[in-house]
Image: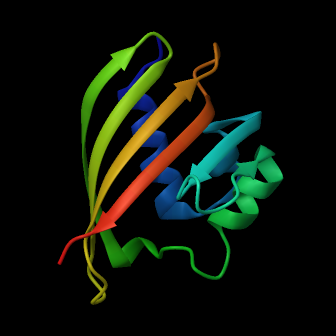
Amino acid sequence: MSDVNSWMDLYQRAWTSNEPEDIKALFSEDAVYNTRPHDKEAWRGHEAIVNEWTGDSSDKPEDWTFEWTLLGQDGDTAFVQGLTTYLNGQPAYDNLWVIRFAEDGRAREFTEWYMARK
């Protein structure tokens, strides 16, 4: 069983810094990151995850706040509900994440769904 609280702290640190090493620390080398599953191709491996995370549309730390709740955990899989509030005029987003952890505590698969609030 992974420590979801620690992983989420590291996730928010990486989101704030956008530093490649912080991002890589979250994921196994062969991890799969699904953003908008079934609508967009997954990011596969460290290089792809870092490149997509830090691309032109990456969030700046001063532009958002994030709250989250652990909905449940079953073995190596955690279910997280989040709320991303943007401070720059963008809408807020409700998030649902499914995180599958490797034995070393890093994510081997991350899937997110998000919906804009009106």
Q: What colour scheme has been applied to the protein in the rendered image?
A: rainbow
In percent of width and height, residue 40 lies at 64, 62
Image quadrant where one finds the C terminus: bottom left
Q: Nearer the viewer, residue 115 or 78?
A: 115
Question: Position of 9 compared to 39: left or right?
Answer: left
Q: Is residue 83 above or below residue 93?
A: above
Q: Quadrant of residue 101?
A: top right
Relative image position of residue 92 (x, y in whole percent): 25, 72
Q: Residue furthest bottom?
A: 89
Q: Is residue 62 left or right of residue 108?
A: left
Residue at x-position 35% and y-position 46%: 96
Q: Is residue 70 left or right of residue 47?
A: left
Quadrant in the rendering for residue 63: bottom left
What is the tally of numbered marks visible in this picture?
Answer: 0
Residue placed farthest to the left in the image?
118
Residue plotted at (42% across, 30% down)? 6
Q: Residue 4's x, y, as percent?
A: 40, 26
- Vertical order, 15 against 45 (above or below): below
36 up-or-down from 57: above or below: above
**Above/below status of 28 relative to 75:** below
Q: Residue furthest front?
A: 38
* Residue 7 appears left or right of 38: left
Looking at the picture, how far across and down is residue 66, in whole percent? 28, 58
Instruction: Please tell me which residue is depicted at 35% across the width and 18% down the height of the picture.
Output: 73
Which residue is pictured at 57% across the width and 21% down the height? Answer: 105
Judging depth in this view, the residue of 17 and 104 nearest the camera is 104
